[in-house]
Structures are given as C-alpha cells and as structure tokens.
Image: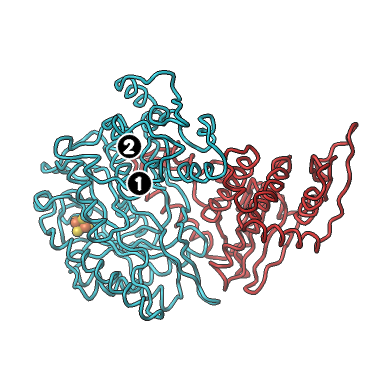
C-alpha cells in the first residue's frame, strides 16, 4: 500500500507514524509526486500537527537527536523519492533505537546518511558563500539559489551571528524568504518583479541598495583578486571547493584574474 | 601620493597573500543581543581565490613599510615598491563592513615593522581593541605578534585575539642569520613561548575562576617557508613536532617558497615546489591527528619524504611485518595506520562491527579506499587480492593511484 501525504514536514511525520504502526505500507509519496496507480492501493494521510509533534517526540526519546535530524535533512533535500529509503530507516530505528546509525552496511542507512551529509554540506557551504547586500532601509538582503531547502537552517545560523540586524535570506528557487527583525523570524514573499529580476541577476535590484553598498562590493572584488597567488593559479581546485552553480549570487568574480589585462604602467 | 582605501587594500592584501594561515576554527564566541558575530568551532570558508586557496579571513598587512630587510620578502626595505599603511579606523571599518556582508569570518592582521616593533604592535592591538570593545565584534581575530615587540604588548594581543602567531619562516638559526639578518631565532621563539605560557596560565586561572576571559582561545600557529633554504623534510618536521609538543601550537603552516626578489642568497626555482609542500602537509597531518611519530616518517637516514607516494603508504611499505591487519579486530589507532582508511571510515568500521559481522565487500561501503587498503588488510582472514603481491608491484600500483599524481596536485586547500 502507498501512503500519500501533503508534502509538508508535518505531513511526512504523520505518514511515518502511520507506516510504523502498519506493516502493509510499502511506499510514502508526497502529493506532488504521486502517480495514479493501476495496481495496488493508495491512501491519503491527513496532516495533523499534534500527531506529527507527538511522533517526533517519541522518535527523539526512543532513538537520538541524530535520527530526528536525519529525517529532517532528508526531507529538506527535496529529492524525489527520498521517502523510499527514509521509511525502512525509520522502521529500523524503531527496532534498534539509537544504534540504527551504526548499521553502515545497511543500504537504507547508508542512503539516509549520504543524503543528510549532502544537505548538511550545502548548508555549511552556504554559511560561507551567502552574501548580504545592504538596502536603503538598512535591511540586509541575501538572495540564494540552493539545491536543497536550507534557507531556514541558514536563518538559524545568522540569528546567532547578526542578532541585532534586520535581514532577509531569500530563496530564489523556492520563492520565499526568511526575515529576522531582531526578535523573531517570519516567512516572507517578495513582489513578482523582484522575484523574476533576482532570478536572472543577483544585483538586478541594485536601485534599492544603500549608497555605500557598491563601494564595498568593489573593495571586496579588488581584495579577491589581490589575494590570489598568480603562480599557483588553479581554477579546477577552486571550482571543486566552490562549485560554479553558486557563483551567480556571490559578489566576487571567480577566475576573473585569469582574463585580466596586465595593469598599465 | 595619499592612497585611498581601495588602493591601500590592493597593496596590503597582495602583500599579505603569501601567509598560508586561513583557519578560522577552534574558537567559540557569541554575540549577546546587541553585538555582532560569532566564531564557529568548525571554521567557515567564505570563498576560494583563483589559486584554489580558501578565503576565510580578511588577510591584510597593517603596513608594508618595513625597517627590516628579509631576503625572501617582497616588502623588505631595499625593494622599491608602492608602500601604504592603513589607519586603525580604516581596518576596523573594513572588517565590520566585510563581516556584515558575510564576506569573511574575521580579520587576520599582520604587518611589516614600521618605526619599531613596539610601535607596530601597538597599532595592531589598537585595531583589535576597537573591534572588540567599541564595535562589539565577536568574529574571529588572528593577529601576528611582531618579533621584538615587548612581552607586555604581546600578552595584551591575546586578550583580544582568538589566535596569536609568530612566523618562524626559516627552520634553522643559520638560514635565519643568512636570510633574515635582523631577526634572530630568539626573537621569534621568545614571543612564541610567552604566548604558550599565557595560554597555559589562563587555562589554570579559568579552572579556578570561571569568569576570567579566555586568552587566545584558538591557540597559536606558525609558518615555515619551504625550499628557500637547504633544510631537509626531517629537519622541518622535527621542528614542527617539537613546536606541537613544547609550545602546544595548534597548526604549523608550510608555504612553498615563491621567488619574489632577485637575490643571490636564494634559490631560483622555476615555480613553487607545491608537491613538497603537499607532502609536508600530509606528514604533518599524520603526526598531529593520526598519532604517528615524526621519526616514523623521516629520519637521519631517509631525511626526505617520498615524492611519488603519500607518507602513510610509504610508511606501510617500509613495514611489511605489521601487515596485513585484521579489520574485524584491530583497534582504532591501528586502523588509522592503514593506507586507505581515514578517521571517518575507521569510526564507521568500529560502529558497524559492533552491530553486525563485517564482510570484505562491506569495506568500500564504509568509505575505505580499497584501491589502497586492499594490500594491507584482511577481513575475517580473507585477503581482498587473490595472492599476496610482491612489494615492488604493490608500490607501483600505489604510485599509479596516488591522488596527488592523478589529480595533478589539486589536493591542496587545508580543510
Ligand atoms: S620583517 Fe621581514 S618578513 Fe616581515 S615585512 Fe619586514 S622584511 Fe618582510
């Protein structure tokens, strides 16, 4: 039997709760990915926040924080079909408790760990690669286009770092942002023109930038080229650490030094 | 001509670029509700420059005006180059502006020696103090102790900075005398010992009084220039090992010498010896993290690391009597000594064999690099290879698959 949930994290938790108490469940699918099935049956799971919270609490108590984190990170990966490995993993966790994470030779455990690492890696990378731009009203604005849904994770990181500023981390792909106003988070959307403009060019909204913003961007671009040692130039290595898909939302221009004209005397 | 901040930044970043240190790890700070910044224990890289090195800190010199004349340095007094000095508030503003935009994890401030060591050190301290006290900056600060500055000033630096460091640059007294005549080994080692003592004293004090602020919580580091002087890998690594144990250094950085001056006292290699630098980092890592002793890797009889093979493989090949190792029984330290097994895979092996019997086919799934490990392990008594090969065949196979060779040395970075 296949369970179909609404695609939310609460929905996933409810579906997992159901699947753990009912051995007939073979698959979990979110509504968006559900295919009409010819054979077999498919059944929707209602999303119930308190049931989801209860399941999360139970899972946390019977296993470990790491297990719960794996569930969350796998969900945030948004990879189609991630549920197919997550379900056997969570079932295994029900049997073995926290030691489930020792079963490195089990295919589902390995797949879940690998996906967690992938999402965690992107999250960590973006804590460094995200760039804030100062807007006229003093808000710091950071557009990103991550593979996985990590904007909220980033917001938690930057709350610790910039608690006294107002900022927005905006996910261009998923069209939502997280805003911190020095007290609390809220999820925000932006006007359509902004959304499509920023999707094309990170600095398309430069008209809203604070006066000094362009100046500091220029300083940083200059610094970025000055700090590189020319005889060690190694763009392949650079690209391995900092994949090209992240470049559009940076301020610096990687490999620009390779094409730079020699300075005039 | 008075340079603007933009020109100064160009000059003083370029002047600082040969310093290899970039780590921003090992410290935890946290802003209160009104401050700015936090230091992450893991460290965060913010970009990678075109040479593939990580950019984590705003790495600049306070000034490149220098009264000294070190042979290997582009900023030495006798060079005719554009000179610039920042003001304290310029550095403070730049650091704040870059940090808020998340370009950097903090500041790495070094300097040429302008006027006198004490004068220079005072400027560096003023920057740190302003950042911490006036601007409530809690990001990472790495500051250089200027050789020859008074002990009191060097002590002060550690009150504001996460890391204080002195670069040894040259591994022996003779090389120092020849190439950096105004510096002496004492001049370099004294501040290093001083910092080590302050850190130790602070640790004791904090044990008794929790409220005592931490002194240089990320410890100290140093840098050695490689291939500018004739020292062997053995001399270099022995020095590093003794710094780790006696001065409790967190890191020693190795920087392949890049010729910037025409100087008859210096070699003129066609390019920096990146492979040697890479091998030294590998060996350093084995000593620091994997529990190898320096003399196991190099000694008087074989003073150089092998260029064609990573130091762990080379060590394993010299010790056929210790292998093969039985994966299902070996302890953590022994597993770490097997080529192809790293920290992560060793931990996974331990975890996995607690819950289920291990099979040879599982090893690759645990992250073991079988290409290297296959020659050195058995699993439940079984070899991965049909018959044990002759040592020279193993060597040839390992050399052919050495990553430094395969990826043409793009394994630098110091993650
Ligand atoms: S003291 Fe020596 S190494 Fe340092 S800036 Fe001056 S000349 Fe260069």
Callout 2: residue from which chain? B
Count of marks, rendered view: 2
Q: Which residue is mark 2?
A: B312
Counting from the top left corner in percent of width and height, residue B245 is at 25, 57
| Callouts 1 and 2 on one subunit | yes
Quadrant of the picture in which ligand 1 is shown: bottom left
In the image, taking residue B249 as reference, residue A86 lies left or right, namely right
Q: Is residue A199 among what the camera can see?
A: no
**Chain coloured red:** A
Closer to the camera in the image, A15 or B331: B331
Task: Find the distance from the CA under tag 1 to the CA under tag 2.
Answer: 10 Å
Closer to the camera in the image, B284 or B350: B350
Question: Label 2 near label 1: C-beta < 8 Å?
Answer: yes
Callout 1: residue from which chain? B
Disc number for residue B290: 1
| On screen, residue B316 above or below B132 | above
| On screen, residue B313 above or below A101 | above
């Amino acid at each position: 039997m296949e369970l179909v949930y609404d695609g939310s994290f609460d929905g996933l938790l409810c579906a997992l709760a159901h699947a753990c108490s009912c051995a007939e469940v073979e698959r979990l699918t979110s509504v968006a990915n559900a295919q009409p099935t010819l054979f077999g049956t498919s059944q929707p799971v209602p999303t119930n926040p308190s049931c989801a919270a209860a399941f999360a609490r139970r899972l946390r108590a019977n296993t470990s924080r790491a297990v719960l984190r794996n569930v969350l990170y796998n969900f945030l990966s948004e990879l189609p079909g991630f549920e197919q490995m997550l379900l056997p993993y969570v079932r295994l966790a029900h049997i073995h408790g926290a030691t489930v994470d020792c079963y490195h030779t089990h295919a589902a455990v390995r797949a879940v760990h690998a996906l967690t690492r992938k999402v965690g890696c992107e999250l960590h990378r973006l804590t460094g690669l995200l760039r804030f731009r100062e807007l006229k009203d003093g808000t710091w604005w950071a557009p990103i286009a991550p593979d996985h849904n990590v904007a909220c994770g980033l917001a938690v990181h930057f709350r610790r770092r910039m608690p006294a500023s107002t900022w927005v981390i905006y996910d261009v792909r998923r069209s939502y942002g997280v805003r911190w106003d020095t007290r609390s988070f809220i999820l925000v959307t932006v006007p359509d023109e902004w959304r499509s403009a920023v999707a094309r060019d990170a600095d398309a909204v430069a008209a809203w930038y604070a006066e000094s913003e362009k100046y500091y961007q220029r300083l940083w671009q200059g610094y970025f080229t000055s700090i590189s040692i020319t005889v060690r130039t190694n763009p392949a290595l650079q690209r391995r650490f900092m994949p090209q898909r992240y470049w559009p939302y940076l301020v610096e221009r990687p490999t620009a030094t390779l094409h730079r004209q020699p300075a005039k005397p | 001509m008075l340079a603007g901040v933009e020109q100064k930044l160009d000059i003083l970043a370029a002047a600082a670029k040969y310093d290899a240190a970039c780590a921003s790890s090992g410290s935890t700070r946290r802003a209160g509700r009104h401050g700015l910044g936090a230091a992450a224990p893991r460290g965060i890289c913010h970009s990678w420059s075109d040479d593939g090195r990580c950019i984590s800190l705003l790495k600049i010199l306070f000034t490149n005006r220098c009264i000294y004349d070190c042979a290997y340095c582009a900023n030495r007094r006798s060079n005719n180059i554009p000179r610039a000095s920042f003001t304290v508030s310029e550095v403070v503003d730049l650091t704040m502006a870059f940090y808020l935009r998340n370009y950097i994890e903090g500041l790495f401030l070094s300097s040429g020696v302008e006027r006198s060591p004490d004068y220079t050190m005072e400027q560096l301290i003023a920057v740190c103090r302003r950042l911490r006290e006036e601007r409530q900056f809690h990001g990472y600060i790495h500051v250089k102790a200027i050789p020859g500055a008074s002990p009191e000033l060097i002590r002060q630096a550690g009150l504001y900075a996460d890391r204080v460091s002195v670069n040894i640059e040259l591994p022996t007294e003779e090389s120092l005398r020849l190439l950096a005549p105004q510096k002496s080994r004492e001049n370099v080692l004294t501040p290093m010992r001083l910092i080590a003592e302050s850190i130790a004293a602070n640790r004791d004090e904090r044990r008794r009084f929790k409220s005592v602020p931490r002194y240089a919580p990320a410890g100290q580091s140093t840098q050695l220039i490689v291939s500018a002087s004739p020292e062997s890998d053995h001399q270099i690594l022995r020095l590093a090992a003794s710094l780790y144990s006696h001065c409790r250094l967190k890191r020693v950085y190795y920087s392949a010498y890049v010729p910037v001056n025409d100087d008859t006292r210096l070699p003129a290699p066609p390019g920096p010896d990146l492979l040697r630098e890479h091998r030294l980092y590998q060996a350093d890592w084995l000593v620091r993290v994997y529990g190898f002793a320096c003399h196991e890797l190099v000694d008087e009889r074989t003073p150089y690391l092998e260029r064609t093979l990573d130091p762990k493989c080379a060590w394993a090949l010299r010790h056929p009597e210790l292998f093969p190792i039985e994966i299902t029984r070996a302890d953590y330290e022994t597993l770490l000594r097997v080529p192809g097994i790293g920290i992560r895979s060793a931990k996974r092996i331990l975890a996995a064999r607690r819950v289920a019997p291990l099979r040879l086919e599982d090893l690759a799934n645990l992250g073991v690099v079988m290409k290297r490990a296959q020659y050195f392990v058995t699993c439940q008594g079984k070899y991965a290879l049909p018959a044990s090969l002759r040592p020279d065949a193993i060597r040839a196979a390992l050399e052919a698959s050495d990553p430094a060779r395969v990826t043409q040395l793009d394994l630098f970075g110091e993650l």
